[in-house]
Image (cartoon, rainbow, N blue to C red):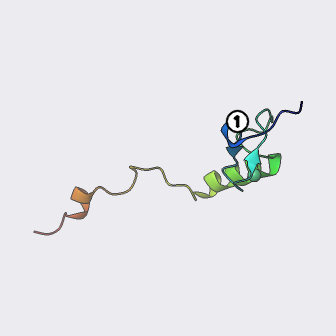
C-alpha cells in the first residue's frame, strides 16, 4: 500500500506554495531553488520584522 500524501503531513513551500515533501532535506522549502530565493529575499530586505516600524505614539510626535 502506497503512503498517501495528504494535507496533514505536507507543508506548503513558503516561496512557491507547492506542497513540500515531508522528508526533503530542503524543508521547509520544496527545493534548493526556493531556499535560495528565500535567502535572497531576506538579504534584499523584502521581509520586514514586525515591531521595527515606528510606533503610533511616535508618529504623533510633533503635534504640539
Ligand atoms: Zn518552492
The answer to which quarter of the image holds residue 25 is top right
Q: Residue at x 19, y 63 (%)?
A: 61
The x and y percentages for residue 19 are 74, 48
Q: Residue at x 43, y 50 (%)?
A: 50
Q: Quadrant of residue 59?
A: bottom left
Name the one closer to the observer, 12 or 43: 12
Quadrant where the image shows the N terminus = top right
Q: Is residue 3 above or below residue 64?
A: above
Q: Is residue 23 above or below residue 18?
A: above
Q: Position of residue 40 (x, y in %)?
A: 69, 54
Q: Position of residue 39 (x, y in %)?
A: 69, 49
Mark 1 Cβ and ligand 1 under 8 Å apart: no
Look at the picture and state if 1 lies above or below 32. Answer: above
Residue ID at (69%, 43%) = 7
Which residue occupies the foreground of this view, 2 or 24? 2
- In the rendered image, the residue lying farthest to the front is 1
| Percent coordinates x, y for residue 38 in the rendering | 68, 51
Left or right of 21 on screen, residue 2: right
Amino acid at each position: 500500500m502506497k503512503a498517501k500524501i495528504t494535507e496533514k503531513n505536507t507543508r506548503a513551500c513558503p516561496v512557491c506554495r507547492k506542497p513540500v515533501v515531508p522528508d526533503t532535506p530542503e524543508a521547509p522549502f520544496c527545493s534548493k531553488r526556493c531556499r535560495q530565493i528565500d535567502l535572497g529575499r531576506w538579504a534584499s530586505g523584502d521581509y520586514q520584522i514586525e515591531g521595527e516600524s515606528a510606533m503610533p505614539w511616535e508618529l504623533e510626535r510633533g503635534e504640539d
